[in-house]
Amino acid sequence: MVSGESKQNYWLGFGGLSKKSLGESAMSDMYKNANLKGSQAIINVNVSYKDKFILIHNQAKAIATGTVVEFID
């Protein structure tokens, strides 16, 4: 299992990345953390989103997870 995440802060609803960009950044981090070699691949990729609201501040987080498999000849 491998994972990656991306966080973004918003003030009064302004600033930061779109939800799509946030998810893509999390997936990029996941692939970087995987250190794939040779005949390895990542399957069952899933991206989940979490929002945390505190008065005028919002923190959005995307978490990408996947399973590393290796193909053998």
Image: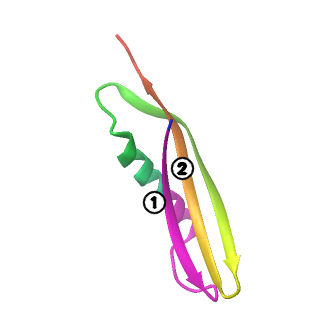
**Depicted 5 relative to depicted 18: above or below:** above
Residue under circle 2? 64
Highlighted magenta segment, given as a residue range: 2-23
Image quadrant where residue 51 sits: bottom right
How far across and how far down the image is residue 27, in percent? 47, 51
Say which residue appears at 45% left-offset and 60% top-offset.
25
How far across and how far down the image is residue 6, in percent? 49, 62
Say which residue appears at 64% left-offset and 89% top-offset.
12
Q: Quadrant of the C terminus?
A: top left
Tag 1 secondary structure: helix
Spatial distance from mark 2 to mark 1, Cα to Cα? 9 Å
Q: Which circle's residue, 2 or 1, is located before the other in the chain?
A: 1
Task: Reply yes or no: does residue 4 show up in magenta.
Answer: yes
How far across and how far down the image is residue 33, in percent? 38, 46
Residue lying at the far top of the rendered structure: 73
Residue under circle 1? 25
Relative depth, front residue between 4 and 45 = 4
